[in-house]
Image: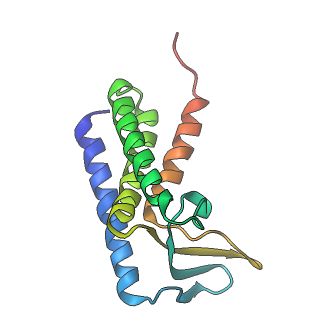
Amino acid sequence: MRLLPAALTVLLLLVADQLSKAAITAHFAYGESVPVIPGFFNLVLVYNPGAAFSFLSGESGWQRWFFIGITIAAVALIMWMIHRHRSDKLFCWGLTLILGGAVGNLVDRIRLGHVIDFLDFVFGNWHFWAFNVADSAITVGAALLILDSFRPRRS
C-alpha cells in the first residue's frame, strides 16, 4: 500500500468522525437520546473518558493522559507497520482504518478530555455501548486484520 492512499483514508475518516461529532453536539444536550428506529437504534450524546466499552471511565482523570500516551505509541507503531508491510494490501487497509479511528478519538481526548459517542444500538432491554464513526473504523479495521490472518502466506 502506498502512503498517499493511507494518508487520505486517515484524513477522510478523521473529517467524517469530527464532523459527525460536531453535528451531534450541536443538536443534542448531554444524555439526550432520540430513537431513529424504535427498539433498535438511537442517537444519543454521551461522553466516554475511558477506553473501549467505557474501560476505566470511572477513574479520576489520570486515564486521559494514559490513553493519549498509548494512542500516540500505537499510531507510531501502526505507521511503521503500514510502511514495513506495504505489499500486504488487506493487512495495510485494516491498519489504516484502525489508524484513522485512533486519530479521531485521540483528537477528542486531547481537545476535550473524553471521547464523544452517539450511536446507540438496542437489543431488547440491552443497550450496546454507545460508539462513534472512529470506533466503527477501528472495528472494521480489526475485522480486516482477522480476515487477513486466515489468508495463506507464501514462504
Residue 126 placed where, x, y %?
Answer: 74, 75
Note whether 142 is above or below 36 in the view shown. Answer: above
> Which one is nearer the viewer's eye here, 81 or 62?
62
Note whether 116 is above or below 39 in the view shown. Answer: above
**What residue sits 25% from the left and 49% below the top?**
8
Number of numbered discs on residues: 0
Note whether 136 is above or below 79 in the view shown. Answer: below
* Quarter of the rendering occupied by the N terminus: top left
> Which one is nearer the viewer's eye here, 63 or 22?
63
Snapshot quadrant of residue 76: top left
**What residue sits 52% from the left and 42% below the top?**
144
**What residue sits 53% from the left and 86% below the top?**
31
In this rendering, would 54 be left or right of 65? right
> Which one is nearer the viewer's eye here, 102 or 145?
102
Residue 65 placed where, x, y %?
Answer: 42, 55
**What residue sits 40% from the left and 33% below the top?**
89
In this rendering, would 5 be left or right of 103? left
Q: How is the image coloured?
A: rainbow
Note whether 34 is above or below 100 in the view shown. Answer: below
Residue 138 placed where, x, y %?
Answer: 48, 52
Residue 143 placed where, x, y %?
Answer: 56, 45
